[in-house]
Image (cartoon, rainbow, N blue to C red):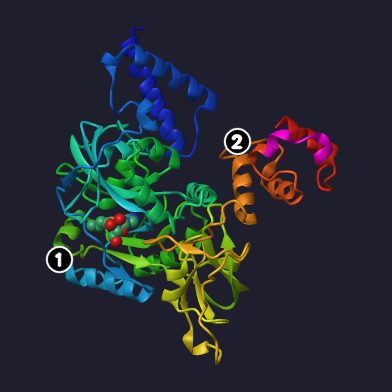
């Protein structure tokens, strides 16, 4: 077999394994076999640059030299959807569609497709001859940014289509999302590096897609679901079958998509999905209903902003009211002071919330929080609880507004505010305990030296015992130093020294 044939064969096989793993969630090969094939492909490609293909599965890892984004006009504008907030409003919309279409069948409604409304950032992909040629963000709806290089790193997006029967040229629209797991991992990392956290997976997905470094995009683990196919040569005359066809070409189309033909079925779908969405691996903020027949879609047409043939149903954000016990001020590794609301414990979407970050002084001021206020806490599908408001009517008489501290709660040094930034800092870098411990923890932690056995908790222990005051001290630790500590036995002392 020639090198060129082998390259083609490996690309096909790797694309197939990728699809099984990232779209079907059913791996067909071990990680080891996959890695071996990828290595072989990479080797052949580097020996034969003449057979390079920008859509080769070996390019999914991205690069750190993505240039700025060029603006591209959408062939058809990317519209938004009208919103509804109750089952009644959805039912009214279905009746209106039936009336406008002159459907007099009584019990039966015109067929309606129900789908999840994925909470990410929308994307338009263009394929020609079965190959991805361009990926463009929604932008202002008329034109968006060409983010092809970043989108190519998303493993569940087919670069070269599978199956057959796809139009020679088509556009497919969908939502790029950051699954909960990847979102939590990213925020954990950012918290550790004292970088601002993403408020929700939607912001994280949108931010990630616009990064200038596609290698970092590749690492973050974006995913994508597709929900709208546009072409002059569509395979079917209805939305549902078109999406099933798109699925057969390799796109991730949610298997929660359901075809229905009565209002009762739609109502049942809403009740069922409002429950099931909590178990999904990605954030959703509602449902979308679409008239299935493309002919009927055409007849219903559009308003200036959105199609009449589709509507969104928004889930209500979960909200609780609870009392503020006190605001604590916490000192990070970089000296940044973060105000934290300590709350009377309250149950919110299945977890007990006791604390919520207030982020900075400006947010405390904007919310106008007073001592012992009753606060609204929300978790609109987001994992991090957020204070969204104050019940002013429930304020205790004489309660004073929360004042931001002027001195470090730990070492007492006067705080400084960097001009133009919301954060207050404790400038006592080398004398403030939480800052020193924070740096020691960071140094031994898994994102830095990853020293076996020391662990992040032990850093505080060693510091408080006077054994480690700075990073250099780690390297002169003796077994006898460690064994004098109650919480460290001879075995762990040995591990620390080896580490
Ligand atoms: S259909 C012309 N279906 O919601 C109709 N949109 O508020 C095009 N979205 O910009 C949209 N899940 O980013 C559709 N299953 C779904 C969706 C969905 C999420 C987003 C999309 C759109 C926004 C509209």
Query: Is residue 227 visible to us here?
Result: no
Q: Tell me: residue 331, above or below residue 177.
A: below
Q: Tell me: residue 293, above or below residue 300.
A: above
State whether label 2 is within 8 Å of ligand 1. Answer: no
Ligand 1: quadrant of the figure: bottom left
Question: For residue 41, which quarter of the picture?
Answer: top left
Q: Tell me: residue 40, above or below residue 121.
A: above
Q: Judge by depth and name the residue closer to the eye, 52 or 454.
A: 454
Q: Judge by depth and name the residue closer to the eye, 313 or 459.
A: 459
Q: Mark 1 points at which residue?
A: 304
Q: Judge by depth and name the residue closer to the eye, 496 or 412.
A: 412
Residue reaching furthest to the top: 1
Q: Is the magenta stretch mostly helix, strand or loop?
A: helix
Badge 1 element: loop
Please report the residue visible at 23 percent of the width from the left and 42 percent of the height from the top.
Answer: 69
Pinpoint residue 226: horizontal percent, then vertical percent. Answer: 32, 47
Badge 2 element: loop
Pinpoint residue 104: horizontal percent, then vertical percent. Answer: 22, 71
Magenta residues? 473-481
Query: Is residue 413 visible to us here?
Result: yes
Q: Is residue 312 left or right of 381 when viewed as pictured?
A: left
What quarter of the picture does the N terminus occupy? top left
Crowding near the residue tagged with mark 1, few <14, some 14–19, many ≥20 C-alpha atoms within 10 Å: few
Residue reaching furthest to the bottom: 397
What separation in Å lies between label 1 and label 2 (alpha carbons)? 57 Å
Q: Name the residue under label 2.
A: 449
State whether label 1 is within 8 Å of ligand 1. Answer: no
**In the image, is residue 137 part of the stretch drawn in magenta?**
no
């Amino acid at each position: 077999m020639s090198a060129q044939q082998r390259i083609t064969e490996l690309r096909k096989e790797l694309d197939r394994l990728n699809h099984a793993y990232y779209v079907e969630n059913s791996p067909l090969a071990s990680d080891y076999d996959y890695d071996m094939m990828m290595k072989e492909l990479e080797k052949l490609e580097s020996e034969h640059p003449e057979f390079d293909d920008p859509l080769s599965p070996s390019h999914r890892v991205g690069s750190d030299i993505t240039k700025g984004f060029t603006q591209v006009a959408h062939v058809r504008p990317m519209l938004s959807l009208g919103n509804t907030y109750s089952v009644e409003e959805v039912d009214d919309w279905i009746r209106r569609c039936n009336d406008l279409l002159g459907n007099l069948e009584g019990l039966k409604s015109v067929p309606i497709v129900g789908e999840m409304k994925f909470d990410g950032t929308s994307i338009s992909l263009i394929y020609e001859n079965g190959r991805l040629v361009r990926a463009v963000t929604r932008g202002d709806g008329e034109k968006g940014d060409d983010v092809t290089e970043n989108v190519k790193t998303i493993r569940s997006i087919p670069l070269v289509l599978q199956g057959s029967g796809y139009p020679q040229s088509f556009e497919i629209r969908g939502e790029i999302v950051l699954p909960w797991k990847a979102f939590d991992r990213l925020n954990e990392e950012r918290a550790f590096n004292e970088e601002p956290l993403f408020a929700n997976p939607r912001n994280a997905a949108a931010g990630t897609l616009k990064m200038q470094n596609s290698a970092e995009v590749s690492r973050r683990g974006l995913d994508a679901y597709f929900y709208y196919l546009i072409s002059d040569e569509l395979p079917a005359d209805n939305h549902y079958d078109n999406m099933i066809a798109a699925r057969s070409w390799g796109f991730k189309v949610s298997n929660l998509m359901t075809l229905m033909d009565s209002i009762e079925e739609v109502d049942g779908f809403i009740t069922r999905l409002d429950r099931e969405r909590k178990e999904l691996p990605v954030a959703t903020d509602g449902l979308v209903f679409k008239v299935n027949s493309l002919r009927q879609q055409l007849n219903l047409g559009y308003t200036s902003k959105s199609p009449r043939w589709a509507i969104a149903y928004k889930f209500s954000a979960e909200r609780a009211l609870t009392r503020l016990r006190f605001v604590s001020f916490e000192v990070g590794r970089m000296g940044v002071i973060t105000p934290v609301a300590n709350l009377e414990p309250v149950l919110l979407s299945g977890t007990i919330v006791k604390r919520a970050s207030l982020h900075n002084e400006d947010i405390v001021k904007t919310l106008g929080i007073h001592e012992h206020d009753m606060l609204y806490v929300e978790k609109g599908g987001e994992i991090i609880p957020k204070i969204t408001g104050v019940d002013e009517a429930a304020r205790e008489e004489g309660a004073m507004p929360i004042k931001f501290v002027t001195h470090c709660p730990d070492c007492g040094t006067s705080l400084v505010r960097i001009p133009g930034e919301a954060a207050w800092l404790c400038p006592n870098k080398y004398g403030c305990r939480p800052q020193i411990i924070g740096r020691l923890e960071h140094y031994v932690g898994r994102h830095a030296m990853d020293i076996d056995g020391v662990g992040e908790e032990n850093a505080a222990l060693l510091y408080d015992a006077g054994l480690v005051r700075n990073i250099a001290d780690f390297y002169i630790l003796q077994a006898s130093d460690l064994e004098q500590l109650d919480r460290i036995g001879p075995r762990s002392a040995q591990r620390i020294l080896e580490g």
